[in-house]
Image: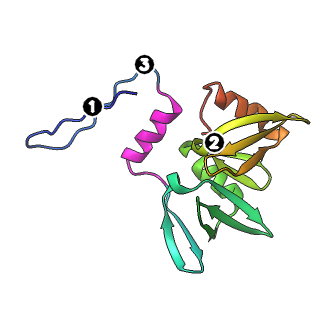
Amino acid sequence: MKVTMEQAGAGEEEVVIRYHQLTPELERLLKFLRKDAPIITGKNEHGQCRLLLKEIYYFERVDDKIFACTKEEEYQVSFPLKEAEEKLKGYGFFRCNKSFVVNIDRIVSVKSQLGNRIDALLDNQEHVIISRRYVKEFRNLLKGGKDCG
């Protein structure tokens, strides 16, 4: 994707996007520019803080608690995994098994496994399993199909 910027004189700032096909990546960019991305807050031993979606690798359920995991930290969030799945579908997050919602922009490689499952390697070297229940939808995403949302 080519990005061109120029400084305008007076007047309102303007963003122009030219495209051949509205891809999931462009849809996420539009949502970001419109500032309608959900705000995620989480807490850990240092207190409560606001998390940027691009920093979240995945949401994980452990013992009925939900955690947002970044490259180096885990933050407990106050909403169920189903809500994370629904709120963040259009932002590159994908329900990959019963305990995880993963940020697909963090996946660097995938490997098929026995039982029609997929092992996804994230850019922080963690592995996430895409269960067979979600494999068909995930393969569609990899082929450039409709985004998760």
In the rendered image, which residue does mark 2 sit on?
107
Kindly report which numbered mark, 1 or 3, lies closer to the viewer in this rendering: 1
Q: Which mark is residue 20?
A: 3
Q: Main secondary structure of the magenta part?
A: helix
In the rendered view, tell whether residue 110 sits above or below residue 40: above
- In this rendering, position of residue 135 left or right of residue 29: right
- In this rendering, position of residue 129 left or right of residue 29: right
- In this rendering, position of residue 48 left or right of residue 16: right
In the rendered image, which residue does mark 1 sit on?
4
In the rendered view, tell whether residue 99 sits above or below residue 66: above
Residue lying at the far front in this picture: please name it: 125
Q: Which circle's residue, 1 or 3, is located before the other in the chain?
A: 1
Please, what secondary structure does the residue beneath circle 3 have?
loop
Please, what secondary structure does the residue beneath circle 2 have?
strand
Q: Is residue 74 magenta?
A: no
Quarter holding the C terminus is: top right
Quarter holding the N terminus is: top left
